Image (cartoon, rainbow, N blue to C red):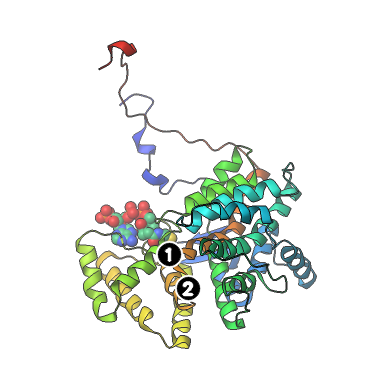
Amino acid sequence: MSNTTNYQDYKPGLEGVIGGLTSISEINSDTSSLIYRGINVHELAEHASFEETCYLLLNHKLPNKNELESFTKTLRSEYEVPKEIYDALESLPKHIHPMDQVRAAFSLIASHDPDYHKHDHDANIRKAIRIIAKSGTLVANGYRILQGKKPIAPNSRLSVSGNFLYILNDGKEIDTKTEKLFDSSLTLYAEHGYNASTFACRVTVATLSDIYSGIITGIGTLKGPLHGGANEEAMKMLLEIGSVENAEHWIRDALTNKKKVMGFGHREYKNGDSRAFYLTKMAKEIGKDKGNTKWGEIADILEKVMLDEKNLYPNVDFPAAYAYYLLGIPIELYTPIFVMARVSGWSAHAIEQLENNRLIRPKCIYEGPKSVSFEPLMLRK
Ligand SMILES: CC(C)(COP(=O)(O)OP(=O)(O)OC[C@H]1O[C@@H](n2cnc3c(N)ncnc32)[C@H](O)[C@@H]1OP(=O)(O)O)[C@@H](O)C(=O)NCCC(=O)NCCS
């Protein structure tokens, strides 16, 4: 070991390392709770709209009635996605995952932003609003394009959630209860401290790149199954299990074979994910309404075995998976829906990073060979 290397300072996966300061959200692992700008996320999911949550994240406080009206009006005026973006998405292969499509789409949308050349605080807030507004339209119409269908014009009379579900539902409005349940899930997914995608987003903007680049970095990072991609994998697992009778055998077998069970475990929560508690209740309510309690019953068995055998709790992605399934949402849209929600958190973090910026550049410990002599090309075997 060289005298410049301190292995004691090295934490694999940066576990427990403080990466920065924030006043956007706080995870309390002891109490399994989460606050956005001081407010408990359960209260927001229950009593506030996703729009109010976005306002809170971007503006440090909940909006009053007039502020909300004005914010909502601006958001709705930005639902539209330029036709050139849809034309470009049409040219992509139809077999790609919607996350790749959404990532590509945001690269293109960036170049259409009227504030493209501006990077000050106010311009970044305007960009954030456009990003939040367009993401639902984009995810839903992007999926239509992958299905060989034509995009539908967004409905500016509807909320972000309502507009997304409207496009997905072939231009038919969805009932208010479904809209509210879906909306609550967006609030729960909106923000979560220095998770991998948010951290990656902050690293990008800290180089004084731009907010869209931060969002695109976030999307690329969220895609992986250890992060946002877990909600899709969790539903595939539930479908593979298929029945309540098969659940216990399946999960024990998975653990024996050292399989990672998607939708379980969390770096920050060791006594359970606060968002999962809320979403499990919600998913079971949807199951009851739909007369389909099977997924909730399978989930109960998996949760019990995972807790008994591994001391692991479900994270937000586990109940989100079967809640969305019960709402009839295609599985490959679960992670893009996470994007729709998390663009609000990423934007707030990008703006916060730039308010007090310093390049993010950790050290690493070199473990390769040293003093290797250079061999000319002709002599190399
Ligand atoms: C979220 C996650 C990446 C956190 O990772 P982490 O803090 O680095 O924890 P590790 O992956 O190092 O896991 C620690 C131990 O718990 C086990 N473990 C953690 N999550 C597990 C899971 N979902 N299924 C089975 N075992 C799990 C690991 O195998 C490891 O055991 P070991 O020490 O015997 O090798 C991890 O729990 C995971 O992969 N979960 C599944 C993916 C998921 O749901 N992601 C969404 C997160 S919101």
- The answer to whether residue 85 of the structure is visible from this angle is yes
- The answer to whether residue 375 of the structure is visible from this angle is no
Left/right of residue 116 with respect to residue 202 in the rendered view = right
Residue drawn at x 66%, y 48% is 110
Q: In x, y percent, where is residue 209? A: 63, 39
- Residue type beneath disc 1: Asn
> Where is residue 133, by image quadrant?
bottom right
> Where is residue 374, by image quadrant?
top left
- In-front residue for pair 271/355: 355
What mark, if any, has residue 304 been given in the picture? none
Task: State the SS at label 2.
Answer: helix
Q: In x, y percent, where is residue 175? A: 60, 83
Residue 148's place in the image compared with 108, above or below, is below
Q: Which residue is mark 2?
A: 324
Residue drawn at x 55%, y 61% is 145
Q: Which residue is mark 1?
A: 231
Left/right of residue 55 with respect to residue 141 in the rendered view = right
Q: In x, y percent, where is residue 347? A: 63, 53
Q: Mark 1–mark 2 contact, CB under 8 Å?
A: yes
Q: Quadrant of the C terminus?
A: top left
Left/right of residue 52 with respect to residue 199 in the rendered view = right
Residue 234's place in the image compared with 245, above or below, is above
- In-front residue for pair 4/145: 145
Task: State the SS at label 1.
Answer: helix
The total number of labels drawn is 2
- How many angstroms separate mark 1 from mark 2 (CA)? 9 Å
- Residue type beneath disc 2: Tyr
| Beta carbon of the mark 2 residue lies under 8 A of ligand 1 | no
| Beta carbon of the mark 1 residue lies under 8 A of ligand 1 | yes
Q: Regarding ligand 1, which quadrant of the image does it lie in? A: bottom left
